[in-house]
Image (cartoon, coloured by chain):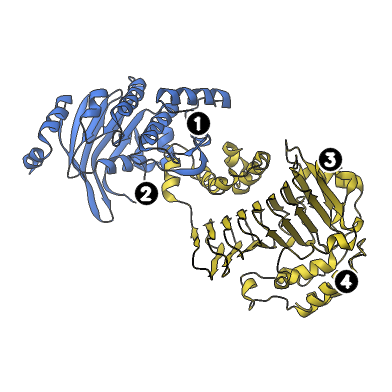
Chain colours: A yellow, B blue
Amino acid sequence: MSEFVTQATAFKPRSAVTQLQTFREQALNQWLDSHLPNRKTEAWRYLSLRALTGDNYFRTPAETPLEDKRALLTLSNIPGLDCYTVVMFNGSFEPALSSLPDSASGLQVSAFSDLSADVLSPYLNSAFNHQAHPFSHLNACHFADGLFVKAAKNAVIDKPLHLVNLVSKQPEKFNVSPRVLVIAQSGSQVSVIEHYISDEAEQSCFVNGISEYCVEEGAQANLYRLDMLQESAIQISGVHAALAKNASLNSFFLSLGSRLQRCDISVNFRGAGAQANLQGVYLPRNDQQVDYHTCIEHCVPHCTSNEVFRGIVSDNAKAVFNGRIHIHRDAQKTLAQLSNKNLLTSNKAEVDTKPELEIYADDVQCAHGATVAQLDETALHYLTTRGVSREEATVMLSFGFINELIEKIQLAEIGSYLRPVLAKRFASKHDLARHLL
Amino acid sequence: MLSIKNLHVKMANKHILQGLDLNVQPGEVHAIMGPNGSGKSTTGHVLAGREGYEVSSGEVSFKGKDLLQLDTEERAREGLFLAFQYPVEIPGVSNVEFMKAAVDAVRAHRDQPALDSMSFLKKAREYCTAVNLDQNFLKRGVNEGFSGGEKKRNEIMQMMLLEPSLCILDETDSGLDIDALQIVAEGVNRLRSPDRSFVVITHYQRLLNFIEPDVVHVLCGGKIVKSGDKSLALELEERGYAWLEDEVA
């Protein structure tokens, strides 16, 4: 891995963001001071980083003609969804392909490069304990530009913001470091769809993204995070939220899996009466790995968190789920729930699931549960007694296992968009998913 | 239609059926009664193809085919239907998706033309109404959060959609109030026809007031110890099973 560190350290991407010089320098020092995780690092021990070595990913991608970009953009289309769209192509903001909100909407979407350091600095690295995330330092060194999204005070944003991060196949390996800052000012309501997608061609990218959500007093942020890169991509990400008094966060995470996919999620309660819902689905197959590390920091009293993640792991794939709930001494009257259920559909599939509760307050309710199982034979039998083939019944049950969460997605268009994608995922033959489409 | 000869079935080395014989002709309704543990539900499960049962000897022929050689789904496609005593809840899979898959599979096997979505839905709605089940139940997860009575009515709705030739009702009446019982019975009676047969497994004579059987059998110790017409059910209601057990012994 030392080669990786050398390559990463030496990489100086073309960047339009010049006003964050100090921030970058700090990040570089933090990166140099931090230790790259290995199998002895508890938070990384079940995930192999080997995919990062061997090739040098630290290159800026080549330019792609606008027409090709436009053609690839159709991949991200969510039918029927009326939304604002911001397109990032191989890490670069594409105004020509985006449809941005106007000022009357109450939603500001700007590139970092258009904003002064005074605007950005108070928020960058503010939502989470960035010291604990070495790859976040790397992101801070490498983002070419960033997206600044702000819902104005008390504004109820009329349409969701579809943030499309599209990557395409390149002849050489390359790095993309997306940086997103979402601020929901007090009393506002905003929905963001962070959509990472590529075409079906074998990908050569290493995507290392950080998204921060600052949800201010009484504000509501809805986040739909869809990681749908082709399986040879490498993706390491952090999604971090800070919630002020009475703020709320509703979030949905999907990972289709890739050669190496790691997502660190943290929710940091900073004001009483806030609540966070997290739902997630991961579906690695073949030789993919998916690793979700979630951390709910209950620092203050009277906050509620509810977290439900489900995974289906097939073939040789591997999934890691670590759900940490940290209830600080002052966080009395906390309600925290965590559930992680896994389905293994092959003898070689592996799941490492670990709820991790650290509780220092004495008047709290905290429940957790984790299961790893195979398909329910009784249910399979029931379906076949009606004439459905065992193969199709297997597809239906697998789909049903995650569909319970898909059905709860508030934006109906996202549910309708995901259904066929997921149904096909379980069916080796298209025919087997036809009743689910 | 169905011919069971000298059927012996074990489960986990416990003998459950010990020489069961049963002949059901097309159009007939047979009731199987008997005390707890006599093998009634096992009979249903073995016929439907549930795993975990070991057939140590005997034969079962269904419409001239060796039933025991068929997979569970093949039995269903050939026209065998088991209404479960405890229907299974399957959250995340909607009733309507499930039944469309089932009806498509069954119709393809029987060389019937496939039903398009509209005609299928029309039928499904009609049968929901017939068993007094709100149409919302089609969209809900299979049996998910259904009450006991709703589950049983859902079984009958499925049965109507699949148009089986042999319907086995495993204690469909248990847990039903009188109104629901009548609805279920009406659903069954509506399906009665000269080429469709029923095997009704029940503890209580009450159901047989609504679904009139041609033959009543008493299953005891894994085999049929007495058969008769519907008056046998009334006699059992009055006298219980003990006298039969004595008679057999």
Q: CA distance from mark 1 to mark 3?
A: 41 Å
Q: CA distance from mark 4 to mark 3?
A: 34 Å
Q: Does mark 3 fall on the same chain as mark 4?
A: yes
Circle 1 residue: B136
Q: Are marks 1 and 3 in contact (CB under 8 Å)?
A: no
- Label disc, if present, on residue B51 of the rendered structure: 2
Residue beneath the point at 56% across and 70% down? A329
Whichever of labels 4 and 3 marks the residue nearer the N terminus, that label is 4
Asked which quadrant contains residue A207, the reply is bottom right
Q: Are marks 2 and 3 in contact (CB under 8 Å)?
A: no
> Could you classify mark 3 by the number of other residues whose Cα lies within 10 Å: few (under 14), some (14-19), or many (20 or more)?
few
Q: Quadrant of the N terminus of chain A?
A: bottom right
Q: Mark 4: which secondary structure?
A: helix
Q: Are marks 2 and 4 in contact (CB under 8 Å)?
A: no
Circle 4 residue: A22
The kind of residue tagged 3 is Ala
- Numbered disc in front, either 1 or 4: 4
Of residues A422 and B129, the one drawn nearer to the viewer in this rendering: B129
Whether residue A142 is visible to the viewer of this picture, yes or no, is: yes
Chain of residue at mark 4: A
